[in-house]
Image (cartoon, rainbow, N blue to C red):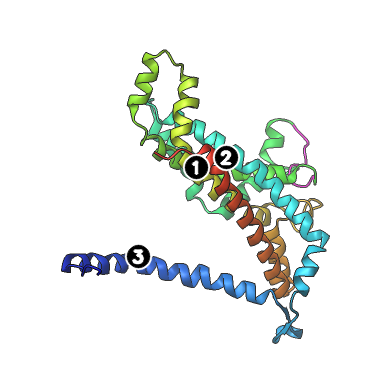
């Protein structure tokens, strides 16, 4: 027989649900329900003049798998993620290790690096668009260059990825700092007694004990990079020759759903992105057993 809950347990149970209910409600209303609505919409075609939806079954999915523009946008998204995720994690990890030590002015350095995270993405994009302008941009004028940073189809997506790295460094660094401060100093002291160098301590103590945090950052950054939109929308001009080689899947969804009013096909693109993200996440969850060490 199940034991009856005491009055204190009932009180704690009720207060627990009371505290998580607003977050749970927001998650359901703002995330869960829209996901199912989007998947439902993907089986329809928007009616003429935006009136009514026409059920088309799997036609949108058949079309999306044969649409060269969709696959091109997917490749652009992968290009962005391949640059942004590893660089932002590696650089942020090094910065976190350095700024976790007792050095003069480390609070100031931490604040400066974190500042882009509290700046509006639109403001960041506009500043970088000015810096990278080929005619009057500060970078070209400062280094006496004549490079088409954001209008050259061959390099534009990589430049945007580097801007993404710069803008997310502070967030990653704070997460790594919180993980580093949970590692007992006894390990480093024992390693120093045994004659281990700083690099050996980093690879044999810091990385293994910080692996759960690294795994979390890796998961969240891949998901976020697959959804890149604002930087591309704000930095790349619609008439730019580099637009076709920089637009992401989310940007393509925006074009179909809100510019061309083809909500069904736009929802199908989001469904494809959701499927790809889920597959990548599942693979990461399987592989983490080999390199993530939980205390």
Above or below, 277 against 116 in this view is below
**Circle 2 sits in a helix, a strand or a loop, which is it?**
helix
Mark 1 or 2, nearer chain start: 2
The label shown at residue 137 is: none
Give 121 or 229, whichever is nearer the viewer: 229
The span shown in magenta is 145-152
Give 82 or 216, whichever is nearer the viewer: 216
The label shown at residue 20 is: 3
Visible residue check, residue 227: no
Above or below, 139 against 10 in this view is above
Given the current orientation, which residue lies at the most extreme front position?
Answer: 1
Mark 3 or 2, nearer chain start: 3
Above or below, 41 against 112 in this view is below
In the rendered view of the protein, which quadrant contains the C terminus?
top left
Q: Marks 2 and 1: in contact by CB < 8 Å?
A: yes
Residue for badge 1: 172
Give 52 or 275, whichever is nearer the viewer: 275
Report, in whole angstroms, how far the alpha carbon at label 1 lies from the one at label 3.
26 Å
Report, in whole angstroms, how far the alpha carbon at label 3 lies from the one at label 2.
32 Å
Q: Residues within 10 Å of mark 3 (few under 14, many from 20)?
A: few
Q: Residues within 10 Å of mark 2 (few under 14, many from 20)?
A: many
Q: Main secondary structure of the magenta part?
A: loop
Residue located 73% across and 74% down the image:
262
**Circle 1 sits in a helix, a strand or a loop, which is it?**
helix
């Amino acid at each position: 027989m199940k034991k009856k809950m005491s009055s204190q347990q009932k009180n704690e149970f009720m207060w627990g649900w009371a505290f998580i209910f607003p977050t749970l409600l927001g998650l359901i209303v703002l995330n869960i329900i829209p996901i199912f609505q989007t998947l439902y919409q993907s089986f329809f075609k928007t009616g003429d003049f935006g009136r009514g939806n026409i059920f088309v079954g799997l036609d949108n999915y058949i079309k999306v798998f044969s649409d060269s523009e969709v696959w091109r946008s997917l490749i652009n998204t992968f290009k962005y993620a391949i640059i942004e995720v590893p660089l932002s994690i590696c650089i942020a990890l090094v910065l976190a290790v350095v700024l976790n030590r007792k050095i003069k002015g480390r609070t100031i350095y931490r604040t400066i690096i974190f500042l882009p995270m509290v700046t509006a993405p639109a403001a960041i994009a506009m500043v970088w668009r000015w810096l990278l302008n080929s005619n009057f941009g500060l970078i070209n004028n400062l280094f006496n260059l004549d490079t088409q940073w954001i209008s050259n189809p061959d390099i534009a997506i990589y430049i945007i990825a580097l801007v993404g790295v710069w803008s997310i460094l502070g967030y990653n660094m704070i997460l790594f700092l919180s993980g580093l401060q949970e590692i007992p100093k006894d390990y480093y002291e024992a390693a120093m007694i045994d004659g281990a160098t700083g690099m050996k301590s980093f690879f044999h103590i810091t990385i293994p004990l910080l692996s759960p945090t690294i795994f979390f950052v890796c998961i969240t950054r891949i998901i976020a990079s697959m959804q890149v939109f604002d930087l591309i929308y704000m930095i790349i001009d619609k008439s730019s020759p580099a637009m076709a080689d920089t637009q992401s899947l989310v940007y393509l969804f925006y074009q179909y759903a809100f510019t061309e009013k083809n909500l069904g096909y736009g929802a199908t693109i989001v469904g494809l992105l959701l499927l790809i993200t889920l597959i990548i996440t599942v693979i990461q969850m399987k592989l983490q057993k080999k390199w993530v060490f939980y205390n």
